[in-house]
Image (cartoon, rainbow, N blue to C red):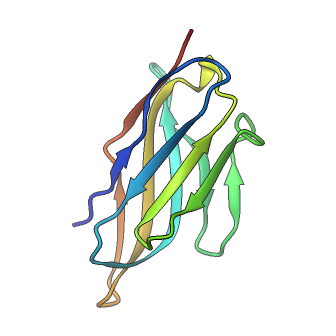
Amino acid sequence: QVQLVESGGGLVQPGGSLRLSCAAPENIFSITAMGWYRQAPGKQRELVAAVTSGGSTNYADSVKGRFTISRGNAKNTFYLQMNSLKPEDTAVYFCNADGLFYSGTDWGAWGQGTQVTVSS
């Protein structure tokens, strides 16, 4: 069982920046696909940014040009850099990933969620 651990959420003023981190256990072989989702109160969870197993990167229209998803130097981490934050970006952010163990078995997991609040 894989559990992703998120960090980096918090309170930030409009126009500010935050970087969210997502870490898988070190015993995984690879992350093949990764993504960030968010859920605001009373709304459905939505895709924010993702990198597919084929290497394509997708962003929600509402965050294009402001958010960037990227891999870390360590094989088990990835990030979401969020710039020019707006109050409407306020939500609980979840990371999601698929990958492989050294045995060749695949895995998929979600993070526990981290709160991002954009407010003056």
Q: Nearer the viewer, residue 22 or 96?
A: 22
- Farthest residue in the top direction? 120
Vertical placement of 21 versus 31: above or below?
above
**Residue shown at the point (58%, 17%) measured from the top left:** 13
**Residue shown at the point (50%, 70%) measured from the top left:** 73
> Where residue 109 sits: x, y (%)?
35, 60
**Which quadrant, please, contains the N terminus?**
bottom left
- Farthest residue in the bottom direction? 103
How many discs appear? 0
Q: Nearer the viewer, residue 49 or 19?
A: 19
> Where residue 106 sits: x, y (%)?
36, 78
> Where residue 96 sits: x, y (%)?
44, 55
Residue 45 in sight from this viewpoint: no
* Left or right of 90 on screen, residue 98: left
**Residue shown at the point (45%, 20%) measured from the top left:** 41
Vertical placement of 28 versus 103: above or below?
above
* Left or right of 63 on screen, residue 19: left
Vertical placement of 80 versus 74: above or below?
above
> Where residue 71 sits: x, y (%)?
55, 64
Vertical placement of 102 versus 32: above or below?
below
Q: Nearer the viewer, residue 78 or 47?
A: 78
Q: Residue 4, located in which quarter of the rendered image?
A: bottom left
**Which quadrant, please, contains the C terminus?**
top right
Q: Residue 92, located in which quarter of the rendered image?
A: top left
Q: Residue 31, located in which quarter of the rendered image?
A: bottom left
* Left or right of 3 on screen, residue 39: right
**Residue shown at the point (75%, 42%) measured from the top left:** 64
